[in-house]
Image (spheres, rainbow, N blue to C red):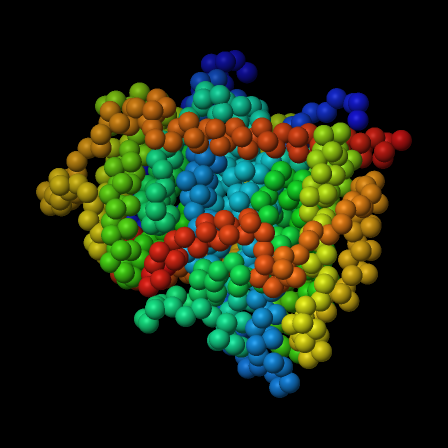
Amino acid sequence: MTHPVDPEWPLYEIFVRGRRGLNHVHVGSLHAADDEMAVRNARDVYTRRNEGVSIWAVRADAIAASSPDEKDPFFAPAADKVYRHPTFHRVPDDVPHM
Amino acid sequence: MTDEARVAEFEATIARHDRIEPRDWMPEAYRATVVRQVAQHAHSEVIGMQPEGAWITRAPSLRRKATLLAKVQDEAGHGLYLYSACETLGVSRAQLTEKLIEGRQKYSSIFNYPTLSFADVGTIGWLVDGAAICNQVPLCRTSYGPYGRAMIRICKEESFHQRQGFELLLTMMRGTDEQRAMVQESVDRFWWPALMMFGPPDAESPNTAQSMAWGIKRDTNDELRQKFVDMTVPQAERLGVTLPDPDLRWNAERGHHDFGQPDWDEFATVVRGGGPCNAQRIDHRRRAHEDGAWVRTAASAFAARQREEVAS
Amino acid sequence: MHDDDHQSVYDGLTGGDESRWAFGAGLEAPDDALAGVGAPVPVGVDPHALATYCLMLGDDALVHSHRLSQWCSNAPDLEEDIALANVALDLLGQARLLLARAAVVDPGVVPVLPAGSPVPDEDALAFFRDAAEFRNVRLVEGENGDFAVTVARMLLFATHRLAVLQRLTASADPVLAAIAAKGVKEVAYHRDHAARWCVTLALGTEESRRRVVAGLERVWPFRDELSRTTPVEATAAAQGFGVDPGSVSDEVEAVLDQVLAASGLERPALPPVGEVAGGAGRDGRHTEAMGLLLAEMQVVARAHPLGRW
């Protein structure tokens, strides 16, 4: 363990296929020490570990793009835990603006 | 392309309310302003985990415990999305974290107030997240593309955080006298700091004009504050709590509520570092960051070793 | 700025077009978290033994979840903060189901609260029992220590729990079987997460290796209790609704050996921690940390026995 180590983990771009029939869609980015960790973190961060979704994690510096620095985070919400959903918290219909 | 042509193209993009994307040329001052605003927002999410996170272990029902833990976890996620948006402008999360813990970048002053009862969990959801939503919804259309896209998801989650908070307070108001008193006391403490979240009055807000011209910011502080008050007053009535402002009343002529001004001296003190929890929040963040350094280094070393083994 | 943005601040967020989301907005709430726990006790099953067994599994999950939730805002990075919160939420979900099931099959285990208290049974069990009534193993209740201790504890706990839950999917109690089926997927992830971190820390730097060795040594002596069969577990196994924890030992040892081998680590050569007056966590005899943990967990609930939350 003599080699110098950069404690800052590289950036990965994350693509998620939400269900069969859809393309993988860019959902955002995150840091991970290696590919394995990137996929696992993506599962936690971007899908809250929904079953049945497919995740691609690509090192940001490995992406060839028409515009080299382009990164394009796009975000989508989590779906598996009930307390993440507004209808779990019943607010009467007569509360304004809510 | 000449500099003049670049500026013209940038200005034209802004003028037609189109988005600036990471690869586009942009004036250095625009880039710096976006980095400052997004970083401040990211830091607010991460520091904002602390005041509510303090009640996870004490939440008085398992359902509320799950809701609260998931909410604070969402805030970590928001911080992460926003740091990612900043990284598209070439500033790393580690650099931003350093700036935060060295006190060179700010976060929302609301998180420098303590959470003193479990009702604060509900009040933060209702008032603080409510104010944050007023501030943030317009940002979904902010001119910097990655920031706007991050904000879409964040606003979606914030809006149900607000519902959760309101629903907690509503449930407590249906409970015992002690619980109702706890809710009122909490609202009394958070009302004025919530109004401060929109920033100083327009006349004293130096950055507003340029940020609006660039489409980074879309409403003035006072406009947003008025919207928040108008939105919140009927909710407070429904809840059965009193907002602690003797000057608060409906003005039929304006079609808005009149309301008093927060103590702007207190606001200035808190922003300068003199709030009740400024030092505590930064210490907490620094400790987590420093205590985690050996773990992050270990994972990097492990990954480097794996790559070497694959290569050899 | 358009006025309608603030007429309905929330509706205006996405313009109602959900197709833009990668995997759906998912704003329909799934079923109630505790749906289905009320099924009748199967013939041939002793309700009190079933309830006590549910409390053992539920208290393990609740207390471990409590410790993991203390990492919130304290983890080594944001990604791991989210991951640990996910594990804590999974275990909290399991605890809620198990405590609720215990209360259904034997209401006698639920603490009696003042007349008119709206506190649901799962909360009465979590917040109104004293330490001596908690049935969790001592392994899960100690202070967190550093990240390596947490990884080591998660590895030992999840390895054992996964082996138990896999067998519990065939429980004579259909509710327990369903809880186990859900839990298997979750705990498989916890075990995997801990195992990967164990290998990473062991092969990372000298410091991380030293820390993970120390972490394993700290939790290892508490391992025995997981696999020692109590009378309730013997009954549970005999009546077909539970698992004799001794019967999963071989599998647990094999998994741990595999992880340790991949990490280049030896098994700590440490004796099991001693019992107290002939008992341990499953008998309600805990460590000193447990009282403090419960004091914190229960303080608000106990101040408001008639409260609604």
- Residue at coordinates 67% horizontally, 74% vertically from top-left? C236
Q: Depth check: A30 or B97 in front? A: B97
Q: Is residue C261 visible?
A: yes
Where is B87 relative to B72, above or below?
above
Pinpoint residue C33: horizontal percent, then vertical percent: 50, 65
| Number of numbered tags placed on the structure image | 0
- Residue at coordinates 82% horizontally, 43% vertically from top-left? C266
Where is B231 relative to A79, above or below?
above
Q: Depth check: C3 or B50 in front? A: B50
Q: Quadrant of the C terminus of chain B?
A: top right
Q: Depth check: A17 or C237 in front? A: C237
Pinpoint residue A50: horizontal percent, then vertical percent: 60, 55
Which residue appears farthest toward the front when viewing the image?
A: C277
- The quadrant holding residue C253 is bottom right
Horizontal side, residue B44 vs residue B134: left or right? right
Q: Depth check: C198 or B144 in front? A: C198
- The quadrant holding residue C52 is bottom right
Pinpoint residue C195: horizontal percent, then vertical percent: 73, 47
Where is B232 relative to A7, above or below?
below
Which residue appears farthest toward the right when viewing the image?
A: B312
Which residue appears farthest toward the bottom when viewing the image?
A: C43
Horizontal side, residue B272 vs residue B204: left or right? right
Horizontal side, residue C43 vs residue A88: left or right? right
- Residue at coordinates 29% horizontally, 55% vertically from top-left? B179
